[in-house]
Amino acid sequence: MNQSKMLTINSQPKVNGLKSSDPKYGWGPANGYVYQKSYVEFFLHSDLMEPLAKFLSSKTNITYQALNVKGEKFQNVKDDDINAVSWGAFPNQEIAQPTVVDHAAFEVWMKEVFTYWTEAWAPIYKARQDKDKNEIPAHQESIDFL
């Protein structure tokens, strides 16, 4: 069977000095300029993590961080690094920095996600009986993915 290896959940493209009035990427007060670092967030099958980390480590302009359900870390950032991924320059005010990637918050979020997946979602795919007592087999591929 063909098993999914990646589940993307969020991303943003690079934006370099677009007017804050831009209909697609603009935000904030009038007559400003907005910036974004490109990024992608995704869940990855464990057998691909080490090869991906090795590849990304060779790229000096890419930062990454990953955690697995066992708590193992793959990263080229420090635990206390905070990385701005969007900011804006607007008249008569300091630089606005509404979106950051914070490793500590990432760790908390990952624990919540893995707990939710293993305790709430994975049991849905276990073997069970329907209302007529017919056996519904486990969907092991889904359980393994989660």
Image (cartoon, rainbow, N blue to C red):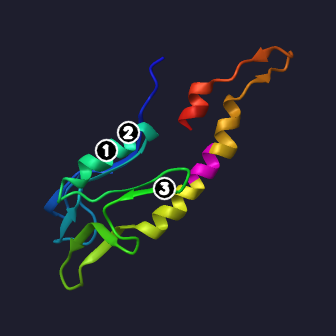
Q: Is residue 20 visible?
A: no
Residue visible at 65% across and 37% down in the picture = 122
Q: Give the structural element (helix, strand or loop) at label 1.
A: helix
Residue 16: which quarter of the image?
A: bottom left
Left or right? Give the position of 65 relative to 30. right
Q: Nearer the viewer, residue 70 or 135?
A: 70
Residue 72's disc number: 3
Q: Which residue is mark 1?
A: 52
- Pointer 3 or 1: first along the chain: 1
Q: Position of residue 10 (x, y in %)?
A: 38, 48
Counting other residues with Cα less than 10 Å from the Cα at mark 1, is it few (<14), some (14-19), or many (20 or more)? few
Image height of 120 relative to 85, above or below: above
Residue visible at 86% across and 16% down in the picture = 133
C-beta proximity under 8 Å, tags 3 and 1: no
Q: Amino acid at mark 2?
A: Leu
Q: Nearer the viewer, residue 137 or 56?
A: 56
Counting other residues with Cα less than 10 Å from the Cα at mark 3, is it few (<14), some (14-19), or many (20 or more)? few
C-beta proximity under 8 Å, tags 2 and 1: yes
Q: Magenta segment, principal secondary structure? A: helix
Residue segment shown in magenta? 113-117
Residue 52: which quarter of the image?
A: top left
